[in-house]
Amino acid sequence: MAAAPRRVRVRVAPSPTGPPHVGTAYVGLFDYVFARQTGGDFVLRIEDTDRERSTRQSESDIIAAFRWLGLAWDEGPDVGGPFGPYRQSERSHIYRQHAEALLQSGAAYRCFCTPQELAARRQARRSQGGQAGYDRLCRGLSEQEARQRLEAGAPHVVRLRVPLEGETAFDDLVRGAVSVHNAQIDDQVLLKSDGYPTYHLANVVDDHLMEITHVVRAEEWISSTPKHILLYKAFGWAPPVFIHMPLLRNKDRSKISKRRDPTSLLWYREQGYLPEALLNFLALMGWSLGEEREVFSLEEMIESFSWERVKTGGPVFDLQKLDWLNGEYIRAMSAEELLERIIAEPYTRRLDEPADGMLAITALVQERMKRLAEFDELTGFFFERKPYDPADLVPSKQDGDFVRQALAAGRGVLEGLDAWSAEALDAVVRGLAETRGWKRGALYMVLRVAVTCRRVSTPLFETMEVLGKDECMARLAAADAAAADLP
Ligand code: GLU
């Protein structure tokens, strides 16, 4: 009888050494989708073995960012679980025991070379064109020698005894066979001189003990995987399935980096990207729903996800595309929901404004909004008059005279208008352009700048309706005064 398939267990394993990275969310998304689709478990493991660079602040930022995205984990440092602790800094004893077991079996050895010695020898080798990496000096130490130095308290690391010949291979689920000559693999450090594990040791031990079935991670780790395979072998464990996701790249194919690109999830949140739009965008970086459909929900992705359709080419991480997608999500919701979300974060300073006014304004700005944080910037003129250059009142191919005539005539017809609705305003202004033989666009431009203080704005007549007659008339009068000196 065939063995029952193992329950899928995946993990995202960020190192809390800086702001939460968009690449972590990208990997986490695929983990999450796969776990939800298969009824498996999604684990959050904090890889804080770099004692100098890891911070609790960074860890809580990662947790908050994942919560914001809605990528909920089943096990993790905050929620616990049967395979804890989920913070590597709390598992040091486990790694030490495992390193000890490898020393006992001969799969690992102690290396007493100091960093200075290593650097000097590396330098010498390099000048002779020799191989980089460790020269394996301590690999030849007799057991007795090693014991003596150990007993004398000499600082040391533990290294893996990598086979000198042969190849190490694995099948990447989305890339196929990958293999490396063992001669090219360094005798990697497993345990550092401070007794802390390296990434390699901690990662392999935890993936095994936490019963991870699929390791999903970024392409940049692909060169570490043969080292991990050797470690699994040394322990006598079966390795998990590996999936290396394509890197997020800029248009010039360079990897996105925090020096040049916004990589922090905190930034995306501050800008007012919707979590569902950001997830949709990240999904498109490695997968497609097919039929050229670019907008889809997390549920839809979970329903039809398969690793076969993961593209390793890595499409371009294009923020303009994200802006477009975010706009699509913004327009797909009701004005009520949009306003609710703007207020909840909040993305506006105007929390004391009457709700109905805010709603009317939101409905007008919804068409043009790409990010929720633009709200105040796009709508500021509703609440206060903004300074503008009177020259902005002048439409192209017109002059100051036209502006003065347009404002005078406009004020005249609008003054007499009682039903201050968008339709009525439209009809009156249209009629004015016709009787005067003016280009409609030119007249609209004068009114638009006078009323909204900008050349690009929300739809003119709806905006005027929301602003109300008194305020519009006051703004038109102010524009008239400002236009007096226009050439
Ligand atoms: N701590 C590694 C990272 O920050 C984990 C890589 C892996 O998933 O193995 O990306």
Image (tube, rainbow, N blue to C red):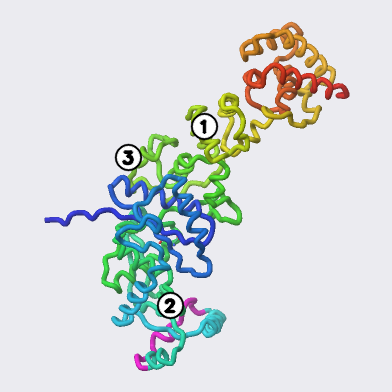
Above-or-below relation of 265 to 295: below
Query: In the image, 362: left or right of 208?
Result: right
Q: Amino acid at mark 3?
A: Glu
Badge 2 or badge 1: first in the primary sequence: 2
Magenta-span inclusion, residue 136: yes
Tell which quarter ligand 1 is in: bottom left
Query: Residue at the spot x=68%, y=9% of the render?
Result: 418
* Quadrant assignment, res 150: bottom left
Q: Amino acid at mark 2?
A: Gly
The answer to whether residue 279 is seen in the rendering is yes
Question: SS for tag 1?
Answer: helix
Instruction: Give the quadrant of the N terminus.
Output: bottom left
Which is nearer the eye, 157 or 290? 157
**Residue occupied by mark 1:** 338
**Residue occupied by mark 2:** 195
Q: Residues within 10 Å of mark 1 (few under 14, many from 20)?
A: many
Rendered location of residue 67, percent (x, y): 44, 48
Instruction: Give the quadrant of the C terminus.
Output: top right
Above-or-below relation of 55 to 403: below
Q: Amino acid at mark 1?
A: Leu
Rendered location of residue 406, percent (x, y): 78, 15
Query: In the image, 442: left or right of 93?
Result: right
Name the front one of labels 2 and 3.
2
Name the front one of labels 1 and 3.
1
Does the residue tagged 2 have its C-beta within 8 Å of any atom of ligand 1? no
Query: Residue at the spot x=71%, y=29% of the render?
Result: 384
Does the residue tagged 3 have its C-beta within 8 Å of any atom of ligand 1? no
